[in-house]
Image (cartoon, coloured by chain):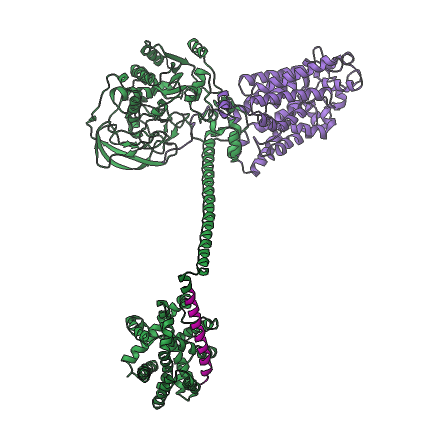
Chain colours: A purple, B green
């Protein structure tokens, strides 16, 4: 009778990629909850659309590539990509934005590069950037927090707006964004960027539109970021992600925003604003830490995170876009292989002092 | 140094990178004593049970061996002998599956125990300190002791170390899950182990002895601490449990903070490490003269009902151990020799326990699943986090799959200790170590090939050089020889003179002959002419004889006439005999002449048939014999003269000599008789005579020995046929002249008659002269 032959090790800790993905998906819950709380059902609807499209695309491509569906379809990677994309898209953006984005993310960015583990860029962020540069109007129609809305944006209204462009009562997205005082509200980062380009100082902007920023740093957004930070800490505790990237990313943002703030506090927002506005925490714990597209070694990841933080501050403060997570992530994805080349860790017994002496 | 000791005394350890904490699973066996098991029916002893060379067998099939008797021996330093684990009979020696990851068959000795367990004569050593270091090391080597922790490195090599030893580390970490063999050995035989350590201390004289035991073995720690309480330089180190702390490099790092440099052995750091089981074996070998014939093996796993540590004789089949521990056959059988992390699957259970076997793990399918759940790597980096060699396993597997061997070397693949931590944690369940093993083997193979190619190239270059040198030497030699010859020629020595004169004489002869040939060519136009010319020639006597012969011939039948015609030439030859004979100065020339003669005869036959035509001879006859092409016959015409000349060169004596020769070639004759194709023969001869023609135009005398030499090859081929024919003819003439029915025979008969006449003529000539 033939015995079973296997290569050592025979023991395994029984962890699975899909389990890892599930963990990450679970960790997004606090952030999504905050998003729902402050911005309504919009993002949840988008997440639903994105997951559906992503799974259908994944199914078709896997079938075409003759890959085992049971292994790959529900490994969670496509779902995670869809969730991240759904989170990133403005809550009341039209439905086709998400459809295009999720199909592009799965079909082009992930599967055309070779599928799971072979993509050079983060699929969600690549799709986000595609949408941002292709449909700038729809992608910047950020809805203000529910508390600032003149109408009650319930689930049906959100659904109707996403699929028809109008609420059940017939308000357009543009009307929803208009403040009682008559000006269009945007995200704190957007407001800041727009008004800074108009020549205002931070102080003046805050005084002109206090409601956008709320009592603390960025109304609504600070809590969304806090939610993702909570999820991130959960992942750190679960050792699903390595501490190196979030730490170096946030640290680098701290350093560079502090430098900019010290240089000119009138034109450069403080660190806490950078940390808690836009997609900072989502990027730090869920996007940059995507293992496929980040650097490999600890040293490499520290460099990777620091570079991303630097780029975010650079683009936010000097560049033309209000937020910069997606761009800096893609730029860092490109740099990752190079970083890997120069950050190979010293192996045991390699390059020790005795060893080099012998070589000499 | 002192800081290391103070740290150790404080219980502070360095941390090696990575490491994992797999479920220990030691509870199956750790609380049961080491059991003695029944003697197996057969022992399977691989000749090689360690790293290095196998020894040469010193027993043969059928031999009765005693317990502890060596079965192999070798003078190779990396070879250790194996011993008979019990007394019995050598049943067989052949290749069989052995306990090795490769699964290859290797030579094994099959021993049938006789049940008496009779020891060989042992020499107990009361006080090993009276022995020299070398004597003890020899004892250890002769006891066949090789590292029992897993690698099987011959222990005496480690002990034969030159540099000063700072640390002797005794490895009792036993970090692999399931295995408790060392644990139990330390608990039950701590005194013997300490004895062994003292022997090592005596040989190595280390500054410190560290016994490293993981903190999950409190009883073993206690036992060893008690046993070594009186030894000042022995320090029991209780180290944290982490896999793979028991790895040599990792343990050195943990205890001393030092790293063994890449490609070096620990003794380059002044460190020697031995396993506790090895220490036990050393103590037994040195003091009690017990070679390494048994070891503790943990038989465990959920598929065995009574998991326990057992004393297993080396060679005990795994099946026997499993039976002893009540193995429950599984639907999908999977046996692992060694631990679950670094052990290997056994091809079957008829494999003998070897010196490095510390565990037999028989898991259930649920315990250690056998599914292949490999998915794509997502580069999560968990493998890199746990790698004790601080490698990047995810990058390595990437390059290993792509067969990018340069990159693998760059990523330090060969620093991988194959501990399996990376594969253990991999969420994509990639069998990383498996890929590394393949890549390592591939790289090693490539390196060997490269080495071979380099050697071959060096060999080729050397050969080319040698050939060139030889060529130069040869040319030099030839040049010198030529110079010497030239010098000799130019000098006035007697030899040179004689050589010169000989050459000159030869040339003169050749010229003379040429002149004659020219004359004869003219005369060959018609028979009458020949006769007339001949009569006008010096040898008119011969001509006269010919004329007489003709006269006779005219009376005879036309057939005979043509033959007679032929006899003209021999007659002439006889006449010129005295002149020609001196020219034949070598044997070869003689042979050549004989050949030529033979040819000449044939030629003359052709010729005569032709002439017969002109002289209104029997036309049917001539058409039969003369099938050669017109131009060929033309050539033969001219050549006839030349052959005639040759005939001249040959004496009557040589002719008569040729006859016995012909008789010796009777076999050939028979052949010739059986299948004579005269026409082809003629053609052949024609060819030959053509070459003769060329020779003639070259003004080189046919009689000259040199020419004969040059032609020797070509002629030889013709010789056989010609001789055969001649012989046939002569034979025919002698024996078969009555058989007129055959045309050939008739001709032959005619030839014979003609010869007879010729001889008569010769005689007459001689008489007349």
Q: Nearer the viewer, residue B652 or A328?
A: B652
Classify residue A308 by image quadrant. top right
Please indicate, yes or no, whether residue A66 appears anywhere in the rendered image.
yes
Please indicate, yes or no, whether residue B358 appears anywhere in the rendered image.
no
Q: Which residues are magenta?
A: B499-526
Classify residue B745 by image quadrant. bottom left
Q: Nearer the viewer, residue B693 or A162?
A: B693
Q: Along the horizontal axis of the image, is A133 left or right of B632?
A: right
What is the number of callouts on the image?
A: 0
Image height of B718 relative to A307, above or below? below
Does B23 appear in magenta? no
Q: Along the horizontal axis of the image, is A306 left or right of A134?
A: left
Decide whether the magenta segment is chiefly helix, strand or loop: helix
> Could you tell me residue A325's position as x and y percent?
67, 22
Image height of B373 relative to B661, above or below? above
Does B504 appear in magenta? yes
> Could you tell me residue B681's position as x and y percent?
39, 74
Q: Along the horizontal axis of the image, is B510 left or right of B358?
A: right
Q: Which of the image's four quarters has the C terminus of chain B?
A: bottom left
Q: Which of the image's four quarters has the N terminus of chain B?
A: top left
Image height of B724 relative to A179, above or below? below
> Could you tell me residue B94's position as x and y percent?
29, 38
Classify residue B448 by image quadrant. top left
> Could you tell me residue B95's position as x and y percent?
31, 37
Q: Nearer the viewer, residue B286 or A113?
A: B286
């Amino acid at each position: 009778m033939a015995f079973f032959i296997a290569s050592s090790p025979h023991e395994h800790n029984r962890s699975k990629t899909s389990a890892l993905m599930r963990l990450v998906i679970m960790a997004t819950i606090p952030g999504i909850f905050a998003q729902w709380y402050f911005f309504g059902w919009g993002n949840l609807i988008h997440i639903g659309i994105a997951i559906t499209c992503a799974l259908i695309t994944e199914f078709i491509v896997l079938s075409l590539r003759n890959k085992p569906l049971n292994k790959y379809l529900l490994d969670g990677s496509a779902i995670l990509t869809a969730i991240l994309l759904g989170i990133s898209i403005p809550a009341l953006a039209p439905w086709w934005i998400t459809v295009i984005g999720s199909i592009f993310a799965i079909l082009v960015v992930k599967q055309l590069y070779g599928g799971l583990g072979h993509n050079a860029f983060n699929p969600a962020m690549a799709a986000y950037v595609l949408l941002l540069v292709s449909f700038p109007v729809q992608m910047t129609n950020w809805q203000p927090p529910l508390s600032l809305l003149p109408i009650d944006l319930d689930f049906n209204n959100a659904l109707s707006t996403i699929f028809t462009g109008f609420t059940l009562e017939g308000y357009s997205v543009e009307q929803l964004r208009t403040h009682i005082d008559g000006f269009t509200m945007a995200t704190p980062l957007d407001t800041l960027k727009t008004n800074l380009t108009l020549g205002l100082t931070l102080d003046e902007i805050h005084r002109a539109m206090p409601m956008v920023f709320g009592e603390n740093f960025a109304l609504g957004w600070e809590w969304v970021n806090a939610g993702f930070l909570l999820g991130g800490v959960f992942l750190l505790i679960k050792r699903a992600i390595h501490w190196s990237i979030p730490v170096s990313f946030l640290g680098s943002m701290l350093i560079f925003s502090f430098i900019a703030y010290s240089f000119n506090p009138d034109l450069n927002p403080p660190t806490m604003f950078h940390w808690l506005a836009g997609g900072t925490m989502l990027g730090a714990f869920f996007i940059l830490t995507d293992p496929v597209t980040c650097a490999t070694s600890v040293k490499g990841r520290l460099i990777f995170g620091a570079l991303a933080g630097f780029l975010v501050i650079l683009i936010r403060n000097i560049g033309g876009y209000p937020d910069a997570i997606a761009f800096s992530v893609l730029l860092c994805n490109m740099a990752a292989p190079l970083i890997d080349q120069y950050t190979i860790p010293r192996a045991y017994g390699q390059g020790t002092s005795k060893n080099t002496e012998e070589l000499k | 140094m002192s800081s290391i000791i103070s740290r150790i005394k404080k219980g502070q350890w360095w941390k090696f990178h990575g490491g994992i904490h797999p479920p220990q699973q030691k509870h199956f066996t750790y609380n049961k004593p080491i059991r003695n098991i029944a003697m197996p029916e057969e022992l399977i002893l691989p000749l090689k049970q360690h790293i290095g060379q196998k020894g040469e067998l010193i027993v043969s099939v059928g031999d009765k061996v005693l317990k502890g008797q060596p079965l192999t021996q070798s003078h190779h330093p990396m070879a250790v002998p194996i011993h008979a684990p019990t007394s019995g009979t050598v049943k067989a020696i052949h290749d069989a599956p052995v306990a090795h990851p490769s699964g290859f068959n290797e030579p094994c000795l099959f021993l049938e125990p006789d049940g008496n367990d009779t020891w060989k004569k042992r020499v107990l050593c009361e006080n090993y300190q009276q022995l020299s270091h070398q004597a003890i090391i020899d004892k250890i080597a002769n006891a066949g002791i090789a590292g029992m922790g897993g690698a099987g490195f011959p222990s005496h090599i480690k002990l034969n170390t030159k540099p000063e030893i700072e640390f002797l580390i005794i490895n009792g970490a036993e970090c692999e899950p399931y295995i408790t063999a060392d644990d139990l050995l330390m608990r039950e035989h701590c005194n013997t182990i300490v004895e062994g350590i003292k022997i090592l201390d005596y040989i190595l004289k280390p500054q410190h002895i560290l016994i490293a035991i993981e903190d999950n073995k409190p009883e073993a720690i206690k036992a060893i601490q008690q046993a070594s309480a009186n030894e000042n330089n022995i320090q029991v180190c209780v180290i944290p449990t982490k896999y793979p702390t028991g790895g040599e490099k990792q343990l050195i790092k943990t205890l001393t903070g030092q790293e063994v440099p890449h490609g070096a052995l620990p003794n380059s750091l002044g460190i020697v490490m031995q396993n506790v089981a090895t220490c036990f074996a050393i103590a037994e070998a040195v003091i009690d003269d017990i070679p390494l014939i048994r070891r503790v093996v943990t038989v465990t796993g959920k598929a065995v009902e009574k998991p326990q540590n057992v004393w297993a004789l080396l060679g005990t089949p795994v099946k026997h151990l499993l039976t002893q521990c009540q193995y429950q056959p599984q639907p999908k059988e999977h046996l692992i020799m060694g631990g679950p992390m670094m052990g290997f699957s056994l091809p079957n259970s008829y494999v003998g326990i070897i010196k490095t076997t510390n565990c037999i793990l028989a898991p259930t399918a649920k315990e250690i699943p056998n599914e292949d759940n490999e998915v794509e790597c997502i580069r999560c980096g968990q493998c890199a986090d746990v790698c004790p060699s601080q490698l990047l396993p995810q990058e390595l597997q990437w390059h290993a799959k792509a067969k990018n061997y340069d990159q693998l070397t760059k990523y330090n693949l060969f620093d991988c200790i194959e501990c399996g931590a990376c594969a253990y944690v991999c969420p994509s369940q990639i069998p990383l170590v498996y890929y590394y093993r393949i890549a390592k083997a591939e790289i090693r193979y490539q390196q060997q090939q490269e080495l071979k190619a380099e050697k071959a190239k060096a060999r080729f270059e050397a050969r080319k050089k040698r050939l060139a040198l030889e060529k130069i030497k040869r040319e030099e030699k030839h040049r010198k020889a030529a110079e010497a010859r030239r010098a000799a020629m130019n000098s006035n020595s007697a030899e040179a003179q004689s050589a010169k004169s000989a050459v000159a004489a030869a040339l003169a002869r050749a010229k003379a002959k040429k002149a004659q040939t020219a004359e004869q060519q003219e005369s060959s136009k018609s028979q009458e002419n020949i006769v007339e010319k001949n009569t006008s020639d010096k040898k008119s006597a011969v001509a006269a004889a010919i004329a007489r012969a003709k006269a006779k011939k005219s009376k005879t039948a036309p057939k005979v006439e043509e033959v007679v015609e032929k006899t003209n030439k021999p007659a002439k030859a006889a006449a010129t005999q005295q002149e020609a004979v001196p020219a034949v100065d070598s044997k070869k020339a003689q042979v050549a002449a004989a050949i030529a003669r033979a040819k000449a005869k044939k030629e003359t036959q052709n010729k005569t048939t032709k002439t017969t035509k002109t002289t209104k001879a029997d036309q049917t006859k001539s058409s039969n014999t003369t099938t050669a092409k017109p131009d060929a016959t033309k050539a033969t015409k001219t050549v006839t003269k030349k052959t005639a000349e040759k005939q001249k060169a040959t004496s009557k004596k040589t002719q008569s000599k040729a006859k016995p020769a012909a008789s010796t070639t009777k076999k050939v004759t028979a052949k010739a008789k059986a299948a004579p194709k005269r026409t082809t023969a003629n053609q052949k001869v024609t060819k030959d005579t053509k070459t003769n023609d060329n020779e003639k135009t070259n003004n080189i005398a046919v009689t000259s020995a040199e020419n004969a030499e040059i032609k020797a090859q070509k002629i030889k081929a013709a010789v056989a046929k010609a001789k055969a024919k001649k012989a046939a003819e002569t034979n025919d003439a002698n024996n078969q002249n009555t058989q007129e029915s055959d045309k050939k025979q008739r001709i032959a008969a005619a030839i014979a008659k003609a010869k007879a006449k010729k001889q008569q003529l010769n005689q007459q000539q001689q008489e007349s002269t």
